[in-house]
Image (cartoon, rainbow, N blue to C red):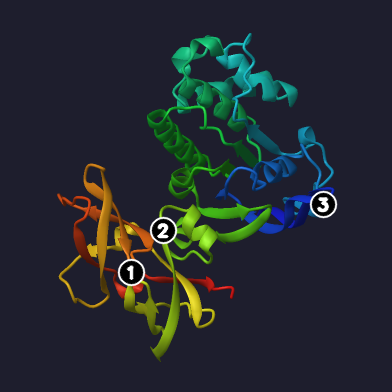
Amino acid sequence: MSILELRSITKSYGDFFASKDISFDVKKGEFVTLLGPSGCGKTTLLKMIGGFQTPTEGDILINEKVVTKVPPEKRDTAMCFQSYALFPHLSVSHNICFGMVQQKIDKREQAQRLADILEQVGLMEHKDKLPGQLSGGQQQRVALARAMVTRPDIILFDEPLSNLDAKMREGVRFEIKELQRKHNLTSIYVTHDQAEALAMSDRIVVLNRGQIEQIGSPEDIYYRPNSRFVADFIGAANIHTAFVEETEMVGSYTISCNMGELDVQSETAPRGQQVYICWRPEDAELCNEGEPNSFAVTVDSTAFQGNNLDVFGWVGAMQDQKVRLQLSGRVTARSGDVLHVKIPAHCIRFLEEVDV
């Protein structure tokens, strides 16, 4: 059974659509991320789920009950804000208990839940401190504890880690995921950070200009993007136009593009004869000249990444398209070098048809 269901949600401001015909559902205990660039409508959608904004059209259901016009305080949801929204004059304990006080939960129950959550988020020794005496990561855990302690049906996260530095952000996101799994919390998480979405989510809803581009598991979104936007937005991708020359058998194709003639093995058939294809930088393998599915790359620049070397270069007879390679191991390359690389046939993905 779905704990949350969105049915054709639209939010418009005159001729501008912040959300347009959004529909999906979320199961109990699922971690779903709303991912997309700034201005794509993900925070607006989160606010409508939380009751802070009302859709222009469509319905929102929580536990099969329509809550489209129900105010935030009467929905069984909790918001974990980007700014933490902690009360600076209240201690950690009083901040965490604030929601339970509003719900008029029995004081003994409050004390038990407080002790449990302080232990779980590692804040027991900080329970009497004010927020200003805590680090950013500790403040984030207070905000998370405050949301969790009321035991809502759904926790809503509005880019909660954006104010943390990179190392702290990585640590806190795993803490959030661990707590979410341990307590089987249903979570809707907003971010524009692709790595964060891939690491934390059960499913990702990719948004663009107020509409859904694709919904799927992190593996689906990364390895089987259905559009140029998704392929380019999620991780790094090399995207080319290609002409489908022939189909040898179901799932096996020959294409021609600016890299030459290549074989493609795909469960998804191309949508037309002239299409876009993509491959990931890490799919490239160094090889000898003339090997199947190989082509030459003229190195423009490189970036050392420890175990990997990022190579930016040019392909094609006119050297008119830049590609990115991610080569593992102790590989060296300099500007002007010509590298021969191959892409396994199963690593090339068909995207949408070229609009001609």
**Nearer mark to the viewer, of 2 and 1:** 1
- Residue at which label 2 appears: 237
What residue is shown with label 3?
A: 15
| Residue 5 percent across, percent down from the top left | 70, 55
What secondary structure is marked by label 3?
loop
- The quadrant of the image that shows the C terminus is bottom right
Crowd class of label 3 (few under 14; some 14 to 19; many from 20; radius 10 Å):
few
* Among the 4 quarters of the image, the one containing residue 289: bottom left
**Residue 159 drawn above or below residue 329:** above
The image position of residue 206, as x and y in percent, is 57, 54
- Taking the spot 36% from the left edge, 78% from the top edge, the residue there is 264
Q: Quadrant of residue 57?
A: bottom right
Q: CA distance from mark 2 to mark 1?
A: 17 Å
N-terminal label among 3 and 2: 3
Crowd class of label 2 (few under 14; some 14 to 19; many from 20; radius 10 Å): many
Residue 162 as seen in the image, left or right of residue 71: left
User: Does the residue at mark 1 contact the one at mark 3 (Cβ under 8 Å)?
Assistant: no
351 lies above or below 34: below
Instruction: Label 1: state its secondary structure.
Output: loop
Residue 229 marker: none
Give, as a three-letter code, the residue at label 3.
Asp
Callout 2: helix, strand or loop? loop
Looking at the picture, which amino acid does disc 1 mark? Gly
Percent across and percent down for residue 114 are 56, 22
The tag earlier along the polypeptide, 1 or 3, is 3
Residue at image point 23% right, 64% down: 285
Q: Amino acid at mark 2?
A: Ala
The relative height of residue 37 versus residue 134 in the rendered view (above or below) is below
